[in-house]
Amino acid sequence: LFAVMSVTERVCVSIRRHRFMQLSLGGLTDLGSMTPAMAGLFQAMVAARLNIVVSGGMDTGKTTTVRALCSAIGPLERIITVEDPYELSLDTDPAHPDVVPMQPRDPNIEGEGGIDMTTLVRWATRMNASRVIVGEVRGPEVIPLLNALNQGTDGSMTTIHASSTREAFKKIAGYARQAKEQLPFDVTYQLIGGGVHVVVQLGKTADGARVVTGLREVVDADPAQVRSNEIFKPGPDRRAVLCGRLSDDTVDKLLDVGFDPAVLGRAG
């Protein structure tokens, strides 16, 4: 819930209600958001502990998609979530057996006692987490998150507002530049190249359906850019179509968890 007054002619209240609180990857397939083969790919990426960034515009289903991805996480893994506000609800029925949800706290009237997203992400890396899930990156918390991804917290996830998989890299670099550390772009690109494995892009079709529109694999980075492979791109109806192939390293990781990327089809 969000409400404003005094800055508007009359009180305005906005209520955001999630329709799909227990949705799995199979459920997203049933809704037409992705193909069964793509759902199998995402499930394998979670099992292979790839670090995933879910990108998209407003109201494209980023939180719902992360919730569905988290449904593929094994019950013996420890999940730490950092959100503002709580939305994933991984600790509710049906609950994952080992989840620690954390939320920032505003300072009191004296300006003390506040705990921000950046602090919570740093704390999450000290809590024996199998995976760290950051509900949405939109500020300086991107730096401790990138550090965590580069220090072995594999299988972690986050979301970001961006209009394409490539723009997601620029948004991450921009947030890191605005932080007090003011990381140069080349340093952030190196952190992305070493910590992020894939970016999943979400969008809407002409009739308003939420769908996966693209997927980009991060390969490496140099001082000028993040080196990546576009695996899926938007088709004529905005739904993702295969356009490239995964790197041998990623293919090996997927084969190790029992998924053969050949089921996706042949690009071109």
Image (cartoon, rainbow, N blue to C red):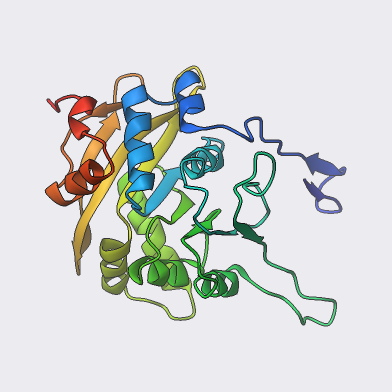
- Residue occupying image coordinates x 56% and y 53%: 135
Residue placed farthest to the top in the image? 207
- Residue 96, relative to residue 206: is it above or below? below
Could you tell me residue 150's position as x and y percent?
33, 69
Q: Is residue 218 visible?
A: yes
Q: For the N terminus, which image quadrant?
A: top right
| Above or below, comparing residue 252 to residue 111 in the picture | above
User: Residue 139: x, y in percent?
Assistant: 52, 65
The residue under the point 51% across, 70% down is 128
Which quarter of the image is occupied by the C terminus?
Answer: top left
Q: Quadrant of residue 19?
A: top right
Going by the image, does 38 lie left or right of 157? left
Front residue of 170 and 146 = 146
Closest to the observer: 25 or 108? 25
Q: Position of residue 202 (x, y in %)?
A: 43, 36
Q: Is residue 56 left or right of residue 244?
A: right
In the picture shown, does residue 128 fall above or below 244? below
125 to the left or right of 99:
left
Question: In x, y percent, where is residue 219?
Answer: 19, 55
* Picture residue at 63% right of the left edge, 60% below the top: 100
Q: Is residue 47 above or below residue 227?
A: above
Q: Residue at x 76, y 75 (%)?
A: 107
Q: Quadrant of residue 59?
A: top right
Horizontal side, residue 194 vs residue 55: left or right = left
